[in-house]
Image (cartoon, rainbow, N blue to C red):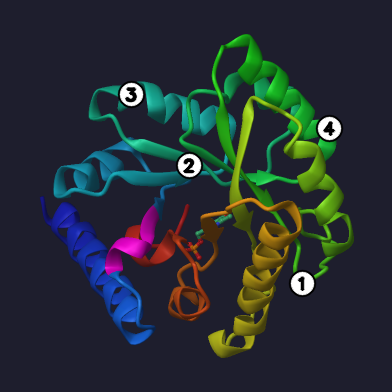
Amino acid sequence: MFEDAELINRWKNVVQEVGEACVKSGRGPEEVTLIAVSKKHAARAISTLAREGQMDFGENYVQEALAKLEELSALRLNWHFIGHLQTNKVKHVPGRFVLIHTLDSEKLAQALHKKSQSQGMTQPVLIQVNVGREAQKYGVGEDNLSSLVERVLTLDNLKLEGLMTLPPFFEDAEKVRPYFARLRELKEELEQRFGIALPHLSMGMTGDFAQAIAEGATLVRIGTKIFGPRM
Ligand SMILES: *Cc1c(COP(=O)(O)O)cnc(C)c1O
């Protein structure tokens, strides 16, 4: 169908641009995973891209995500949870997402750990950091990051794999770059302090993924540029 062809074209362009941003930053394309952010888009669009080879998808809302996971379970996709996670929704989450990007409190960590433990599994997580110190955004502040990491490292059924951020918005993407650089610094400081490896930095969206890749992103979360505007 015509719409499918347009979607596939947009996706191919994004794949190419992500690859070009890697080359420009002296990084291998295999170092960066493209997560197609499919929130508010139909399962059909997801299966179209899955047929082309896109395996990683990001969702923000638990109910919407679970419906799509079920509908598309035969495709064996890698689902990422990238939205704000409420403690009362935690019971639905462990085991269903390859990575939860938005851990931002001890309370949530404890709840996720408990649920994962009861399912006999270990849930990979990223800690979301509010690097822009914006009141309206979720994420742990820099001042509380270290103590949250310390806590998460004591929870056997969580596996801390890195940091995620949703930086302030600027028309000029170059202005976002210092926030990406800061997240990388924080990751490096934590690795030093705790003697751990944190392989992932989840940062960069439609408007600023090239800058994020230049600053070390390993996971970019791109929605609009692939799927078009959300309803
Ligand atoms: C919606 C969303 C994205 C995708 O944003 P686009 O600008 O559409 O690429 C990425 N990350 C998070 C956390 C989101 O909520």
Q: Is 211 rendered above or below residue 136?
A: below
Q: Nearer the viewer, residue 226 or 113?
A: 113
Cα distance in 3D space between marks 1 and 4: 22 Å
Cα distance in 3D space between marks 4 and 3: 31 Å
Residue identified by numbered label 1:
132
Residue identified by numbered label 4:
107
Of callouts 2 and 3, the N-terminal one: 3
Q: Are marks 2 and 3 in contact (CB under 8 Å)?
A: no
Q: Nearer the viewer, mark 2 or mark 3?
A: 2
Q: Is 94 rendered above or below residue 128?
A: above
Give the magenta-colored segment's residue range: 29-35
Locate residue 183 relative to residue 212 in the image: left or right.
right
Residue shown at the point (58%, 54%) measured from the top left:
198
Amino acid type, label 1: Gly
Q: Is 196 rendered above or below residue 10?
A: above
Residue shown at the point (34%, 86%) measured from the top left:
24
* Residue reaching furthest to the front: 195
Q: Which mark is residue 71?
A: 3
Q: Is residue 40 visible to us here?
A: no
